[in-house]
Amino acid sequence: MPGSIVHVGATGQCPHLGQISVVAANRVLVNGQPVGTVADQYPIAGCPFQVPVPGGTKPQPCIRVQWTVPSTRVFSFGRAVVTQASTGLCLSAEQIPQGPPAMTVVQPRVVAM
């Protein structure tokens, strides 16, 4: 499924409205910014999610995104690029899947499959 390529400066949200950012140091650029690949970092800040436990709650915020289905046809130095249509999981510090990420603001000009 085609989608706009994610780059440094693109933003997204975890299911609990935490903010996803892109940390990449790639030499391939779109709109003057490095493209995001599956090997790059996608930290999440400000996730308020908590799990109810007997006697209170336990903070379980999303802290990073792990991409499971990136682009299948477009690569940057042997690494699949991430698109707005890519599938991934937001993970907690304990590596517990919290739900899918949603990349909301990306550049619209370069599309990949």
Image: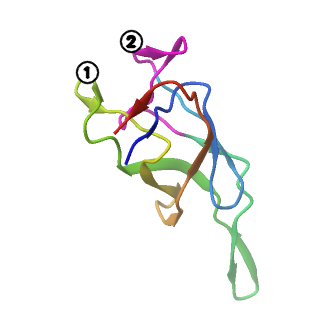
Residue 37 picture location, percent across and down: 38, 32
Mark 1, other Cα within 10 Å: few <14 / some 14–19 / many ≥20:
few
Front residue of 6 and 41: 6
**Residue labelled with disc 1:** 77
Residue at 25% across, 36% down: 73
**Residue labelled with disc 2:** 27
Residue at 36% across, 38% down: 38
Mark toward the start of the polypeptide (2 vs 1): 2
Instruction: Please tell me in which quadrant of the rendered image residue 48 appears.
Output: bottom right
Determine whether the residue tagged by mark 2 lies in a helix, strand or loop. loop
Predominant SS along the magenta part: loop
Question: Which labelled disc corresponds to residue 92?
Answer: none
Determine whether the residue tagged by mark 1 lies in a helix, strand or loop. loop
User: Going by the image, does 19 lie left or right of 29?
Assistant: right
Compared to 88, does 24 lie above or below? above
- Identify residue type, mark 2: Arg
Residue 42 picture location, percent across and down: 52, 39
Residue 68 picture location, percent across and down: 35, 53
- Identify residue type, mark 1: Phe
Disc 2 to disc 1, how far (Cα)?
A: 9 Å
Compared to 106, does 103 lie above or below? below
- Check whether the beta carbons of the residues at disc 2 and disc 1 lie within 8 A of each other: yes
User: Going by the image, does 46 lie left or right of 80?
Assistant: right
> Is residue 1 rendered magenta in the image?
no
Quadrant (top left/top right/bottom left/bottom right) for the C terminus: top left
Q: Which residues are magenta?
A: 25-42
